[in-house]
Image (spheres, helix red, strand yellow):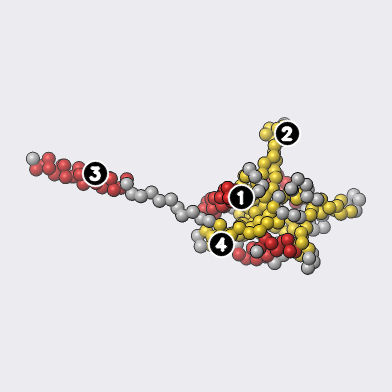
C-alpha cells in the first residue's frame, strides 16, 4: 500500500515538473527598429564621356529612373540601425534590375525592383558625409514590389539587414566614390553589381558618373 502511495506521489511530482517545463512562456526576441530613416536623393544627372567623338553627354532621368550606363536608381537614402550596441548606417539604393528566365538561351527577359544596401560604420559614414569615398564590407539585397518606399518595404529592408548582421554575412569590399567638384556640385559613382564587375574600368570621374547639387547630396545626412 505504501509503495503504491509513493508511486502515485512520484508520478504527481514528475507530472508537475513536466507541466512546468513545457508550459514556460515563449518569448520572441525584441524587434530591432530603425533609429532613423533619412531623406532621399531622387534626382541626379548621369554624365558620360564618348572618346570616339571627344564629347561629354548628359543622360537625363527617364520613367522615374536616373541612369548612367550599367547603373540606375529611383532613389538613394540612409537608414540607421543599432545592433549589439553598435550603430550601422545603411546606404540604400533603390533600383531597377533584370535577368533572363532562361539565361542559357537568353529568353524570357523580365525586370524587378531591388534595394541594394551598403552597411557602414561611423568612420566610413563620416567620409561620405564629408564628400569622400567610403568602403563597405557588407552588402544586403532586398527584393521589393514597389519603388515607392513605404512601411512594408522598410520592414522588409530592416529585417533583411538584421538577418545579415546576425549571420555576419559579408561580401567583397564595395566602394562608393564621392568627389566634391565645387562648392555647389558633388559627383559620385555607385558600386557595380556582380554581373557588371568586368566593366569597372569604364567608370571614373574622367569617364562616367552621377552629378547632384551639394544641397541635394546633403539631404542624405539630415
Mark earlier in primary sequence (2, 4): 4
Tell me how far mark 3 sits from mark 1, CA to CA: 50 Å
Tell me how far mark 3 sits from mark 4, CA to CA: 47 Å
Tell me how far mark 1 sits from mark 2, CA to CA: 34 Å
Mark earlier in primary sequence (3, 2): 3
Q: Which residue is mark 4?
A: 87
Q: Nearer the viewer, mark 3 or mark 1?
A: 1
Dot 1: few (<14), some (14–19), or many (≥20) neighbours within 10 Å? few
Q: Nearer the viewer, mark 1 or mark 2?
A: 1
Disc on res. 15: 3
Residue appearing at x 72%, y 61% in the figure: 217
Q: Which residue is mark 2?
A: 106
Mark earlier in primary sequence (3, 4): 3
Q: Is residue 78 left or right of residue 21?
A: right
One can see residue 221 in this view: yes
Mark 1 vs 2: CB contact within 8 A: no
Horizontal and vertical percent for residue 159? Answer: 54, 50
Amino acid at each position: 500500500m505504501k509503495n503504491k502511495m509513493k508511486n502515485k506521489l512520484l508520478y504527481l511530482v514528475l507530472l508537475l515538473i513536466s507541466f512546468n517545463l513545457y508550459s514556460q512562456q515563449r518569448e520572441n526576441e525584441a524587434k530591432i527598429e530603425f533609429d532613423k530613416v533619412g531623406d532621399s536623393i531622387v534626382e541626379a544627372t548621369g554624365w558620360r564621356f564618348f572618346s570616339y567623338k571627344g564629347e561629354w553627354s548628359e543622360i537625363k532621368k527617364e520613367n522615374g529612373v536616373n541612369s548612367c550606363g550599367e547603373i540606375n536608381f529611383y532613389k538613394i537614402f540612409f537608414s540607421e540601425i543599432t545592433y549589439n550596441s553598435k550603430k550601422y548606417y545603411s546606404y540604400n539604393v533603390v533600383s531597377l534590375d533584370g535577368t533572363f528566365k532562361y539565361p542559357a538561351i537568353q529568353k524570357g527577359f523580365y525586370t524587378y525592383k531591388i534595394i541594394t544596401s551598403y552597411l557602414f560604420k561611423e568612420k566610413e559614414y563620416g567620409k561620405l558625409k564629408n564628400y569622400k569615398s567610403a568602403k563597405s564590407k557588407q552588402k544586403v539585397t532586398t527584393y521589393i514590389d514597389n519603388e515607392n518606399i513605404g512601411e512594408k518595404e522598410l520592414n522588409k529592408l530592416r529585417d533583411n539587414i538584421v538577418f545579415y548582421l546576425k549571420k555576419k554575412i559579408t561580401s567583397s569590399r564595395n566602394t562608393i566614390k564621392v568627389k566634391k567638384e565645387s562648392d555647389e556640385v558633388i559627383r559620385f559613382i555607385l558600386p557595380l553589381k556582380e554581373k557588371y564587375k568586368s566593366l569597372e574600368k569604364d567608370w571614373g570621374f574622367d569617364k562616367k558618373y552621377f552629378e547632384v547639387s551639394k544641397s541635394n547630396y546633403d539631404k542624405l545626412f539630415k
